[in-house]
Image: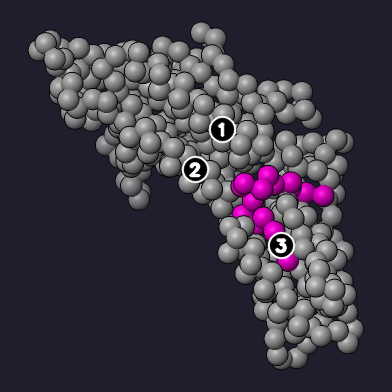
Amino acid sequence: MSSSGGKGAKGGGGGKKKEVKKETKLGMAYKKDDNFGEWYSEVVVNSEMIEYYDISGCYILRPWAMEIWELLKEFFDAEIKKLKLKPYYFPLFVTENVLQKEKDHIEGFAPEVAWVTKSGKSELEAPIAIRPTSETVMYPYFSKWIRSHRDLPLRCNQWCNVVRWEFSNPTPFIRSREFLWQEGHTAFATKEEADEEVLQILELYRRIYEEFLAVPVSKGRKSEMEKFAGGLYTTSVEAFIPNTGRGIQGATSHCLGQNFAKMFDITFENEKGAREMVWQNSWAYTTRSIGVMVMTHGDDKGLVLPPRVAPIQIIVIPVPYKDADTTAIKGACESAVYTLNESGFRADLDTRENYSPGWKYSHWEMKGVPLRIEIGPKDLANQQVL
């Protein structure tokens, strides 16, 4: 689809009537069942979710994708606030010395770590890593902040980007060198508290996929070979992509045990005055969730968005005919959009005069809007919508 398709100015009203474009190139070139990979690459671009960038594996997330991410974030933030999670933001950079404190953990990420080695033309005295994840960024400060049982539990959450560099065949949302995620990091006095939270968070991830993205998932525990490096055990939600016949990891909730507490000396004084190590968890989900949704629901016309995450749930399109009262039709459309928005729906009106109604139908189908309302002269006369 031409990138100018979504940029036509809204509004109508007075002025010289614009020529209606006879645009015919909104369709998909690839069929989902015939060439799944090419279909997926095409749909995320044509629906205006992403734009390819000039660095492989990096993508521009456009508003249609970011608004979905914001809706998921809004739900998740509200739920973790009930669990007394606090918002934090830790720096993007981490020193090599800190990374080397945890060899098992870093060995799992070593090939993927990106390094900053220069400032301008000058070599840095020591290279600085860009976080692939934040355990080693955060935990030196957990050791500083936790002194007593009164400081527990410590429960942090941050929304940020991470970078994982060395891999081939990047795929938008699914496997990219830079991506957005939420990561939670918590510390408790007892293993029982940590175990309970692992499952609480896993259930929230299930709800994100099943209640918002309408993607069925299975909750379970990873094998010892698949668990998070340096952790005690890992749980995850897994989705299934019918067109590939493969499962895909949707989100993870890890119990880290006391492994990182040993490495970073995260201890507390219990009620009896003795020193103990904390029990820790970490958990995350990413913008991969959007890609899983696209793969699951999209069809040969483009995206198919579940209503709860659709940035626009209802699009209203005026259908004027020759000699019709276009002002009255537009007024009826505006009234419908106002009523829908006041009723709690996310509705919008497409009044672009330089595109035909048929082009608009294809455009909004490509973007996956769940419901379309058309209002023409007969609908106006009969006080109805189609």
Location of residue 205 with respect to 32 vertically, above or below? above
Q: For this view, does 336 lie left or right of residue 104? A: right
Please report whichever mark, 3 or 2, sits nearer to the chain's N-terminal start.
2
Residue under pointer 3 = 315
> Which image quarter: residue 137?
top left
* Residue farthest to the bottom, as pictured: 15
**Is 19 covered by the magenta stretch?**
no
Residue 316 percent across, percent down from the top left: 73, 66
What kind of element bears circle 2? helix
Dot label at residue 289: none
Q: Is residue 33 visible?
A: yes
Q: Amino acid at mark 1?
A: Arg
What kind of element bears circle 3? strand
Query: Is 53 in front, or is 211?
Result: 211
Location of residue 257 with respect to 305 vertically, above or below? above
Q: Amino acid at mark 2?
A: Phe
Q: For this view, does 170 lie left or right of residue 264? A: right
Residue 152 percent across, percent down from the top left: 23, 25
Residue 60 percent across, percent down from the top left: 57, 52
* Residue farthest to the top, as pictured: 224
Residue under pointer 2 = 75
Residue under pointer 1 = 207
Tell me whether the residue at label 2 lies in contact with that at label 1, contact meaning CB atoms closer than 8 angstroms.
Answer: yes
Location of residue 310 with respect to 290 vertically, above or below? below
* Residue span colored magenta: 301-316
The total of numbered circles placed on residues is: 3
Label 2 neighbour load within 10 Å: few <14, some 14-19, many 20+: some
Q: Is residue 51 visible?
A: no
Residue 219 percent across, percent down from the top left: 58, 20
